[in-house]
Image (cartoon, rainbow, N blue to C red):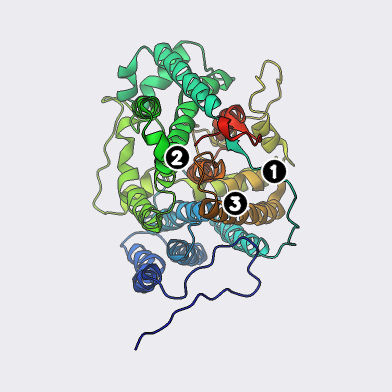
């Protein structure tokens, strides 16, 4: 006897939401993966790290870190198993789970940190507690985004789209900007040497100095960001349009942009978090409707961050400056490499309590007006990570300053709560708009189909900080989108 299946529309579903079948192969797959994925991320891996032999003390900091790791693991598993792809929220929980969860837990167990924690355990306890509070506020913000007044449909709703001729203009800008960067650095070979070689070349040419990095930010921004944005737009065009796949000019331009990105945006000469941005945004654009790719990206993101990232700094320095890690534990690289976010947040708490206090928006203002040179704004704030590093007496002040620390240094605990409440709200709204528009609007010129994947990838950099360093590429990306986006309804000028 045949069994009839029907679709169930949940009560209170906002207009335009995509209905999900009650029973589907994807749902069955999610159910099969749910138990091992949730148990693996929230219990098995944290327990495996926690039982490692080490001199770390099992105090309140340790147990609160365990709670944070388990909480982030549950939320990451939920993001991977959700019916709709939630790119921004998935990237957020991926970062929290690895950089604020598993890695700091390993550091606490092994009593090793990549950056010294100069304060007391009480300051570290405050930092871990505020990270957990920020995560809870993020979840509350996502819940609040579901309860919003329903707006009446407008008579003439204009949706942004990519202008066909301007897209080719952006490609030309990308080639020019990347060519200037390549020439400035002495040729393509330097992009396959080390990041240190590129930094030294930029400083030698006077584009960066100890007082200002505006020149360096614009040089690298216009040399890398337009190339990525143009590649994403042309990828979307080819994936969604048969007509574009029949046009040799479009295919040739896409191929040239792919080669260009292989030079200026490769993982050898770029920071690992920027390469994550390139990789995530490209995959989510090339596979706009694939839940399997989304889940694989999150799962492989965890594996790559825990296994590959600690050893990926092989290309940061030349052969003489690279020092390989000699380790007897699989988790020791997490304790001595890169993941200094929780420790730097604790140092920020110690710094504020030692006298300077909170800055009440000064640091965020410096990030918002990153393009103003210090010659014009002599009192322009320094990177928060640099400021804390100099206060600590560190020789290398290229340190992280996670978003929790940026909000804390300006506004205290209230700023952390309010900031992540708003971030959760906006992230959920962006993910919901992306799911709705990509399921209904499958045009090649759908701006949301490019913007959300790019934000999801770049969120790793924004969450890691410092914000001042992250602001440069944001400004260049906004210029790129302003160049190619139009609200005109003339379909002859739009991608198709």
Q: What residue is at 73 percent from the left and 55 percent from the top? A: 153
For disc 1, the neighbor class at 10 Å (few under 14, some 14 to 19, many from 20) is: many
Q: Counting other residues with Cα less than 10 Å from the Cα at mark 3, is it few (<14), some (14-19), or many (20 or more)?
A: many
x, y percentage for residue 71? 49, 66
Query: Quarter holding the N terminus?
Result: bottom left
- In the picture of the structure, the residue carrying the numbered disc 1 is 410
Camera-nearest residue between 355 and 128:
128
- Which image quarter: residue 308? top left
Q: Residue at x 47, y 71 (%)?
A: 21
- Residue depicted at x 53% and y 43%: 455
Mark 2 residue crowding within 10 angstroms, few (<14) / some (14–19) / many (20+): many
Residue 231 vertical placement versus 29 (above, below): above
Q: Secondary structure at mark 2?
A: helix
How many numbered markers are drawn? 3
* Residue corresponding to mark 2: 236
Kind of element beneath mark 3: helix
- Residue 214 is at least partly visible in this image: yes
Q: Which residue is mark 3?
A: 430
């Amino acid at each position: 006897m045949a069994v009839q299946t029907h679709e169930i529309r949940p009560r209170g579903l906002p207009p335009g939401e995509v209905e999900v079948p009650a029973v589907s192969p994807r749902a069955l797959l999610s159910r099969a993966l749910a138990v091992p994925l949730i148990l693996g991320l929230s219990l098995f891996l944290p327990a495996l790290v926690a039982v490692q032999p080490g001199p770390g003390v099992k105090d309140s900091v340790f147990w609160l870190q365990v709670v944070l790791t388990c909480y982030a693991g549950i939320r990451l598993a939920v993001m991977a198993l959700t019916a709709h792809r939630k790119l921004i929220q998935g990237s957020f929980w991926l970062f929290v789970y690895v950089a604020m969860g598993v890695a700091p837990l390993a550091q606490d167990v092994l009593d090793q940190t990549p950056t010294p924690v100069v304060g007391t355990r009480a300051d570290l306890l405050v930092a871990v507690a505020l990270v957990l509070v920020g995560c809870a506020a993020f979840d509350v913000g996502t819940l609040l985004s579901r309860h919003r007044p329903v707006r009446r449909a407008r008579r003439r709703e204009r949706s942004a789209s990519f202008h066909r001729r301007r897209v080719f203009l952006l490609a030309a800008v990308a080639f020019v900007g990347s060519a200037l960067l390549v020439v400035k650095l002495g040729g393509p070979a330097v992009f396959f040497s080390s990041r240190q070689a590129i930094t030294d070349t930029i400083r030698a040419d006077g584009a960066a100095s100890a007082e200002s990095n505006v020149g360096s930010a614009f040089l690298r921004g216009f040399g890398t960001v337009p190339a990525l944005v143009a590649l994403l737009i042309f990828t979307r065009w080819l994936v969604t349009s048969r007509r574009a796949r029949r046009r040799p000019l479009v295919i040739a331009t896409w191929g040239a942009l792919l080669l260009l990105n292989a030079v200026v945006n490769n993982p050898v000469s770029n920071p690992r978090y920027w390469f994550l941005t390139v990789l995530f945004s490209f995959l989510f654009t090339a596979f706009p409707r694939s839940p399997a790719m989304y889940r694989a990206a999150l799962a492989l993101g965890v594996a790559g961050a825990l296994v590959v990232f600690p050893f990926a700094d092989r290309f940061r320095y030349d052969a003489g400056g690279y020092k390989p890690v000699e380790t007897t534990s699989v988790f020791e690289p997490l304790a001595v490499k890169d993941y200094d976010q929780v420790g730097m947040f604790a140092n920020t708490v110690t710094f504020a309590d030692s006298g300077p206090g909170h800055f009440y928006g000064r640091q965020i203002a410096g990030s918002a007006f990153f393009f103003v040179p210090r010659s014009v704004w002599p009192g322009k704030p320094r990177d928060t990570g640099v400021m804390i590093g100099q206060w600590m007496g560190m020789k290398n002040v290229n340190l992280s300053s996670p978003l929790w620390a940026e909000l804390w240094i300006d506004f205290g605990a209230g700023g952390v709560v309010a900031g992540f409440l708003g971030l959760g709200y906006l992230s959920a709204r962006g993910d919901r708009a992306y799911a709705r528009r990509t399921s209904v609007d499958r045009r090649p010129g759908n701006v949301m189909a490019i913007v959300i994947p790019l934000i999801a990838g770049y969120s790793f950099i924004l969450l890691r900080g410092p914000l001042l360093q992250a602001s440069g590429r944001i400004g260049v990306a906004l210029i790129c989108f302003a160049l190619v986006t139009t609200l005109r309804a003339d379909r002859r000028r739009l991608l198709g």
